[in-house]
């Protein structure tokens, strides 16, 4: 496995065909499952590690976001990645540059709570596509709205890349794996799995034909009573990322909550 610490170093490697897995590092099994999916595609695997300042708001955790490049490199070596691309911020953003803004799918939920977040995501992903020129790029459904934003950007801008979206890896108790789980106190960590249990309950009830509005209201009340500070918990259409009460193969329940200062997002697909 080869590690490139700058754009110039990466370009010098003359990597042609590849499957790209973009990450912000602090890798866990969820990230490694994307690497395995990339390997299954039979292409050399490039994993980018870049904590992207452009997708963090002024009061978010950019400076304290967990970083451990040596450990990440060791995990990626074990998982069979071929190249690690870990550029510096100066290298990626030498000046205030052009940015990509994706309409509609980026507007609600995470988009309205985190202004500019998806501009940052779309811009960095587009730049990574330009630098690494992948045939395929792999993302996790854990960040469902991010998947919708990237899919829309690729369609709108005719970017020639195949997208692959992989299921969320979870801890044995159901908590979605996330680099931010390290922020949870032991008490909060014990509470956190209830979020996925609630999502699973909601999925079962909706799929068995129960009233959607009542089911969502009950789930919201149950989460609040368990100590979650609720941001949103809603049934949406994944294509537009707007609220929808019509059930279809594009339906999903999405949620964002806070436990103390830590924000958790999760989702479950319906049908
Ligand atoms: P991040 O480093 O948080 O930006 O995540 C990098 C990629 O890993 C994104 O495509 C995420 O959706 C994906 N990812 C994060 N957590 C998980 C998980 N628990 N299961 C599967 N993929 C994940």
Image (cartoon, rainbow, N blue to C red):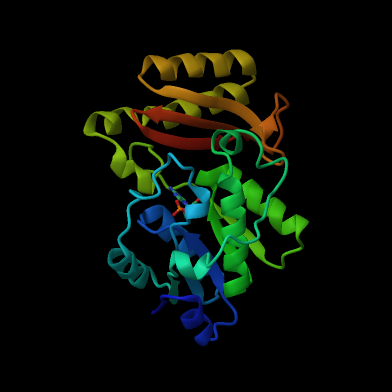
Vertical side of 121 occupied by 73: above or below: below
Give the residue at x 51% y 77%. 44
Vertical side of 189 occupied by 100: above or below: below
Vertical side of 235 occupied by 136: above or below: below
Quadrant hosting residue 117: top right
Taking the image as shown, residue 249 lies to the left or right of residue 227, namely: right
Quadrant hosting residue 104: top right
Residue 205: horizontal and vertical position, in percent?
Answer: 56, 21
Judging depth in this view, the residue of 64 and 210 nearest the camera is: 64
Judging depth in this view, the residue of 57 and 139 nearest the camera is: 57
Residue 140: horizontal and vertical position, in percent?
Answer: 52, 51
Quadrant hosting residue 187: top left
Give the residue at x 57% y 67%. 128
Taking the image as shown, residue 244 lies to the left or right of residue 260, namely: right
Taking the image as shown, residue 5 lies to the left or right of residue 183, namely: right
Give the residue at x 75% y 60%. 157
Count of picture labels:
0
Judging depth in this view, the residue of 202 and 119 nearest the camera is: 119
Locate the N terminus and report the quarter of the image it occupies. Answer: bottom left
Residue 108: horizontal and vertical position, in percent?
Answer: 64, 34
Locate the C terminus and report the quarter of the image it occupies. Answer: top right
User: Is residue 24 something one can see in this rendering?
Assistant: yes
Residue 94: horizontal and vertical position, in percent?
Answer: 53, 67
User: Is residue 210 something one can see in this rendering?
Assistant: no
């Amino acid at each position: 496995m080869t590690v490139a610490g700058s754009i110039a170093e990466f370009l010098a490697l003359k990597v042609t065909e590849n499957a790209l897995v973009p990450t912000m590092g602090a890798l866990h099994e969820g990230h490694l499952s994307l690497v395995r999916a990339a390997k299954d595609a039979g292409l050399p695997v490039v994993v980018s590690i870049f904590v992207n300042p452009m997708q963090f708001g002024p009061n978010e955790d950019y400076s304290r976001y967990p970083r451990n490049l040596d450990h990440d490199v060791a995990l990626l070596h074990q998982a069979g990645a071929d190249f690690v691309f870990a550029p510096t911020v100066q290298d990626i953003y030498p000046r205030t540059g052009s940015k990509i803004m994706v309409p509609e799918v980026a507007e609600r939920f995470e988009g309205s709570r985190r202004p500019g977040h998806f501009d940052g995501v779309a811009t960095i992903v587009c730049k990574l596509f330009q630098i690494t020129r992948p045939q395929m790029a792999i993302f996790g459904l854990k960040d469902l709205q991010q998947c919708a934003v990237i899919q829309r950007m690729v369609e709108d801008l005719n970017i020639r890349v195949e997208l692959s979206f992989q299921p969320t890896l979870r801890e044995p108790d159901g908590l979605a794996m996330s680099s931010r789980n390290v922020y949870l106190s032991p008490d909060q960590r014990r509470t956190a799995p209830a979020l996925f249990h609630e999502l699973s309950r909601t999925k079962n009830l909706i799929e068995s034909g129960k009233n959607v509005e009542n089911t969502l209201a009950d789930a919201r009340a149950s989460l609040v009573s368990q100590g979650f500070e609720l941001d949103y918990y809603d049934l949406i259409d994944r294509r537009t990322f707007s609220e929808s009460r019509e059930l279809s193969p594009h339906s999903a329940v999405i949620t964002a909550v806070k436990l103390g200062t830590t924000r958790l997002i999760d989702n479950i697909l319906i049908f």
